[in-house]
Image: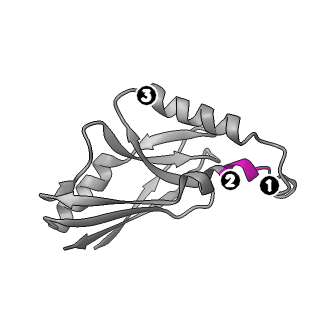
């Protein structure tokens, strides 16, 4: 089963917990045990798994990325001034695959699936969720 999530983002950079939306898709699929792949269909966005309890973790991730990959110094910036977003997306990755157990994501206690907006705000960010039965 494959389904799409459409997100609108409101900031230049933000991290959004999409775990509930992905779990809804898994519930609909009726897959008891299998795999779930979550894929961002964008070159300036990413999918990560990290803590969802303390919002400072997400802010710290963005701060660390901004220190590691500063804006405005790359060749691609001559085209559309978002080279840093492309580089950050490459570092983080466009997808994650998570086990499904008992018809839900098999994540750790504090883990969540996060969409990373790196070049927003955007009105129609697409995420493809593919659920595969064992």
- How dense is the environment of label 2, judged by Cα within 10 Å: few (below 14), some, or many (20 and up)? some
The quadrant in which residue 130 appears is bottom left
Label 2 or label 3, whichever comes before in sequence order: 3
Q: Position of residue 82 (x, y in %)?
A: 74, 50
Of the 4 image quadrants, the one containing the C terminus is bottom left
Tell me the element at label 1.
Answer: helix
Give me the residue at 19% from left, 63% from top: 28
**Contact, mark 2 vs mark 3 (Cβ under 8 Å):** no
Q: The magenta stretch spans which residues?
A: 81-87
Q: Residue 55 shows which numbered tag?
A: 3
Q: Secondary structure at mark 2?
A: helix
Residue with the mark numbered 1:
80
- Is 22 positioned to the left or the right of 77 in the image? left
The alpha-carbon separation of the residues under discs 2 and 3 comes to: 23 Å
Which is nearer the N-term, disc 1 or disc 3? 3
> How many marks are shown on the rendered structure?
3
The residue drawn where x is 31% and y is 51% is 21
Looking at the rendered image, the disc whose residue lies closer to the viewer, 1 or 2, is 2
Find residue 52 and report its image quarter. Answer: top left
Prevailing secondary structure class for the magenta stretch in the rendered image: helix
Q: Estimate the spatial distance between the alpha carbons at disc 1 and disc 2, rounded to whole Å.
A: 14 Å
Residue 11: x and y in percent read 59, 38
Q: Residue at x 24, y 55 (%)?
A: 24
Give whichever of 132, 17 is nearer the camera.
Answer: 132
Please give the label number shown on residue 87: 2
Query: x, y (%) of residue 88?
Result: 64, 49
């Amino acid at each position: 089963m494959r389904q799409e999530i459409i997100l609108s983002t409101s900031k230049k950079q933000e991290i959004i917990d999409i775990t509930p939306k992905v779990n809804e898709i898994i519930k609909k699929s009726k897959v008891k045990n299998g795999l779930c792949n979550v894929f961002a269909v964008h070159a300036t966005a990413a999918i990560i798994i990290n803590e969802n309890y303390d919002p400072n973790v997400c802010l710290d991730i963005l701060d660390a990325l901004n220190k590691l990959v500063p804006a405005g110094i790359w060749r691609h910036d001559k085209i559309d001034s978002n080279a840093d977003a492309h580089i950050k997306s490459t570092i983080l990755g466009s997808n994650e695959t998570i086990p499904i157990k008992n018809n839900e994501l098999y994540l750790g206690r504090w883990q969540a699936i996060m969409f990373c907006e790196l070049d927003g705000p955007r009105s129609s960010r697409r995420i493809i969720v593919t659920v595969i039965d064992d």
